[in-house]
Amino acid sequence: MELSVTQFVTIDGVYQAPGGPEEDPSGGFAHGGWSAPFDDDAFGEFMVSVFDRVDAFLLGRRTYEIFASYWPEHNEPGNPIANKLNDLPKYVPTSTLETADWSGTELLHGDLTKEVAELKARPGRELQVHGSGELIGSLLAANLVDTLNILAFPVLLGTGKRLFPENSHPAAFTLAETRVTTKGVLIATYRKNGAPTYGDFGSDQ
């Protein structure tokens, strides 16, 4: 399976609590729910297309707990997102959770790089990460991410957890696709392309 990441961010890189005020108020974050005003058909169609490709989920502990408290109660027949989240395998790297009640969940307590590499080696299409900002940083550092879907919302918050904090692991990506929703959300898909290369604008080369 390829490992793909889908993440909502503000234009200043904040990923914390896009879905609602109580989603993640840690650190005194007061802007929860910042993505909700930008929902439209184009946004929904893109998200459905992402879930059409999934065969398993890899979720950070906090994102897992948020999802587990919501999606089992909203599993209407024919819902292309809820049905996938409820029915497909979910893997959660954690050093704190000992049990998980959401059907299809397996907790990973071993070495992250090894366990995720083993998951990727299994047959299938995509092993998907949604939210889970801290986990994404670890996966990038281990060179395990194949695709990044970054949805940049036209809002600046100034505080909150950043997707790419200082000292993030250097990596290069190729821009594969872009689209803009009617409400101004820029959706960009990037494919892994090794390490960054460098040059000099003052050079003749």
Image: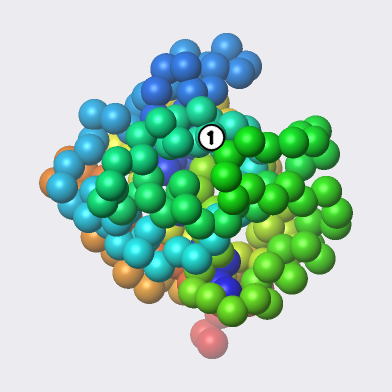
Judge whether residue 14 can be spotted in this image: no
- Residue placed most toward the observer, 22 or 184: 22
Residue 40 vs residue 67: left or right? left
Q: Give the answer, above or below, for where 61 lies relative to 145.
A: above
Q: At 54% across and 61% down in the image, what residue appears?
A: 56
Judge whether residue 91 can be spotted in this image: yes
Classed neighbour count for the residue bearing mark 1: other residues with Cα under 10 Å, few (<14), some (14–19), many (≥20): some
Residue 3 vs residue 118: left or right? left
- Residue placed most toward the observer, 101 or 109: 101
Indicate the position of residue 160 as horizontal and vertical percent values: 54, 26
Which quarter of the figure is the N terminus placed in? Answer: bottom right
Residue 158 vs residue 52: left or right? right
Q: At 51% across and 57% down in the image, what residue appears?
A: 88
Indicate the position of residue 168 as horizontal and vertical percent values: 68, 51
Q: Give the answer, above or below, for where 82 lies relative to 178.
A: above
Q: At 82% across and 39% down in the image, what residue appears?
A: 95
Amino acid, disc 1? Ala
Callout 1 secondary element: helix
Which quarter of the figure is the C terminus placed in? Answer: bottom right
Indicate the position of residue 8 as horizontal and vertical percent values: 42, 43
Total marks shown come to 1
Q: How is the image coloured?
A: rainbow
Q: Give the answer, above or below, for where 204 lies relative to 13.
A: below
Indicate the position of residue 19 as horizontal and vertical percent values: 39, 30
Q: Which residue is mark 1?
A: 68
